[in-house]
Amino acid sequence: MDEGDSDDDVIRVEVVSAFAASPMPKLDAKTLRRLQNLPSPTHISTLLGLYSTRDKVALFTFCSSVCLAWPARQDKVLAAIAGHTGGGFVRELYREHVRSSPLGAEVDASALTGEFGPYTVVDLS
């Protein structure tokens, strides 16, 4: 028998009712200025200008994280992406990753085209 495998080992479990949140660290002014640069349109545009084909998923992940961390700046981040690439960045991601995945395999386009299939739209006015 291996010395590490002992049936005599006691596992101790404690039940806790709440966890105390640890306080956030105090950031100096220089670090705060640098963090505020992350969601700026200038910074996002610079990153978009530098991205290569293989980095596009990582860049999308970064931009999504910035939007989650700064919801008030989300519109500016998304506008910088759309403005810098003319929609090409989003189009490439969709074509290469969504359309070829199970998520995009069975998309019913009728909802996007305004056709209602067997349903009839009735004007009640």
Image (cartoon, rainbow, N blue to C red):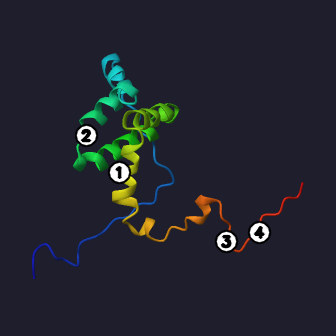
Label 4 – label 3 distance at C-alpha: 8 Å
* Residue labelled with disc 3: 117
Tag 2–tag 4 contact (CB < 8 Å)? no
Q: Residue at x 37, y 33 (%)?
A: 84
Labelled disc at residue 51? 2
Q: Could you tell which of marks 1 and 2 lies nearer the N-terminus?
A: 2
Q: Secondary structure at mark 4?
A: loop
For badge 2, the amino acid type reads Tyr
Q: Is residue 99 above or below residue 51?
A: below
Q: Secondary structure at mark 1?
A: helix
Depth check, mark 1 against mark 3: the one in front is: 3
Q: Could you tell which of marks 1 and 3 lies nearer the N-terminus?
A: 1
Q: Could you tell which of marks 2 and 4 lies nearer the N-terminus?
A: 2
Residue 97 located left or right of residue 113: left
Label 1 – label 3 distance at C-alpha: 30 Å
Instruction: Report if residue 49 is visible in the image.
Output: yes
For badge 1, the amino acid type reads Glu
For badge 4, the amino acid type reads Thr
Residue 15 located left or right of residue 110: left
Quarter of the view holding residue 27: top left
Residue in front for this viewpoint, 37 or 88: 88
Labelled disc at residue 120? 4
Q: Quadrant of the N terminus?
A: bottom left
